[in-house]
Image (cartoon, grey):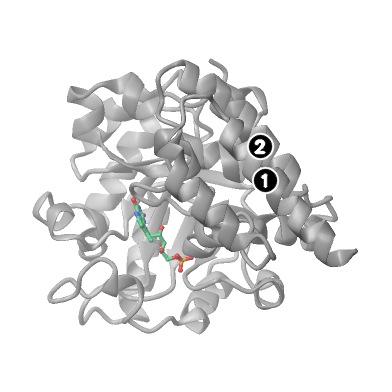
Amino acid sequence: MEALKLKSGDRWLSVAPMMDWTDRHCRHFHGLIAPDALLFTEMVTAEAIIHGDRDRLLAQAPETIAAGRCVALQLGGSDPDRLARATELAAGYGYAEINLNVGCPSDRVQSGRFGACLMAEPDLVADCMRAIAAATSLPATVKCRIGIDDMDEEEGLDTFIDRVAQAGVDVFYLHARKAWLQGLSPKENREIPPLNYDRAERLARRRPDLEISLNGGLDDVSRIIGLRDRFDGVMLGRSAYRTPMILGELSAAVKGTTTPSRLSVANAMADYADARTAEGVPLHSITRHMLGLYHGQRGARVWRRHLGEEARNRTDGGALIREVAAACERMATSIAA
Ligand SMILES: Cc1cc2nc3c(=O)[nH]c(=O)nc-3n(C[C@H](O)[C@H](O)[C@H](O)COP(=O)(O)O)c2cc1C
């Protein structure tokens, strides 16, 4: 399968890699709302790709591919040869970019000596990236933090980026807070270390030759628009998941695209669910990603409750999605009338 070629500017908006969240169903949903966003997979370890069920781990939804969405595959690992092998094995699954996770702080990941702890090993990351780049013609990119533990946020980050850039990497997604590797859960590590956009901006100014996307805490359209000219792109994680229409609002504000209606997104997802459930995918594993679609609307509670509670019991494809979306639309119009 021919991979899509990312062009300059295509990374202006991306949806962050999120384990257990950004699976192929979720990516299809986000792609309907923001067709021009770069969508990340969950992190997949190199070892899982080498030893595991590759189709299950890597296959994308045919509708996502047919629609021409750009999807980046995020790898976890720190052995250059294994990462190169995993990259080779991922060829043909239609990804547009291969990304290395240098930001995840979980104990499991640390014990495998990858994720955020690699910020302390820029030379190893550079070797990994050389190996990945040699194994693919796709862009090889890095997602990292601004530091870990007591690493100097100025010098340490500059050294890390410069060494990795020397290996040919020119695209970085920067979660603009440190990871504290001892004593915090991964969730706390996404909330407690303070965000430092200024530090990220200093990096972007010092290295204008690199493409830097800002990540962390971006959940407000006007704030994001205000930050946009300081970075090459913005990456949204939790806000995209919990309030997905923010992606459409951003696309509309920045690119002048028409935001698709909630109803059209819901109906397209119902068609998608018809196809997937016919293949044996449980409806719930699709609808669980869609609970935020009506966030902030009159029907939000009805949507969340019915979709959340009834999806496990239904065996008629995407009909539930169509029914609840129609009910939410009726609520909106009866109030407007
Ligand atoms: C449930 C969840 C899972 C995550 N899994 C990953 C992951 O697999 N790889 C990664 O690089 N970051 C992961 N992250 C971190 C996000 O990619 C992102 O950097 C972080 O949430 C900060 O962005 P946000 O404030 O926009 O959510 C995860 C975050 C969440 C909430």
Per the rendering, the mark at residue 336 is: none
In which quadrant of the rendered view does residue 240 lie?
bottom right
- Give neighbour class at mark 2: few <14, some 14-19, many 20+ (Cα, 10 Å): some
Say whether residue 123 is visible: yes
Per the rendering, the mark at residue 325 is: 1
Residue 190, given in percent of the width and then of the height, sits at: 34, 71
Whether pointer 1 and pointer 2 mark residues with C-beta atoms closer than 8 Å, the reply is yes
Name above or below for residue 129 compared with residue 274: below
Quick one: 252 or 295, which is closer to the camera?
295
Ligand 1 visible in quadrant: bottom left
Tell whether 182 sits left or right of 265. Answer: left
Quick one: 190 or 326, which is closer to the camera?
326
Name above or below for residue 91 compared with residue 192: above
Residue lying at the far left in this picture: please name it: 111
Q: Residue at x 30, y 35 (%)?
A: 131
Q: Residue at x 40, y 56 (%)?
A: 143
Q: Amino acid at mark 1?
A: Ala
Q: Amino acid at mark 2?
A: Arg
Say whether residue 139 is visible: no
For label 1, being within 8 Å of ligand 1 is answered no
Residue 175, given in percent of the width and then of the height, sits at: 42, 67
Quick one: 220 or 117, which is closer to the camera?
220
Q: Residue at x 72, y 49 (%)?
A: 262
Residue 54, given in percent of the width and then of the height, sits at: 30, 22
- How far, Cα to Cα, is label 1 from label 2? 5 Å
Tell whether 152 sits left or right of 300. Answer: left
Per the rendering, the mark at residue 322 is: 2
Quick one: 273 or 109, which is closer to the camera?
273
Q: Secondary structure at mark 1?
A: helix
Name above or below for residue 91 compared with residue 116: above
Quarter that holds the C terminus: bottom right
Q: Secondary structure at mark 2?
A: helix
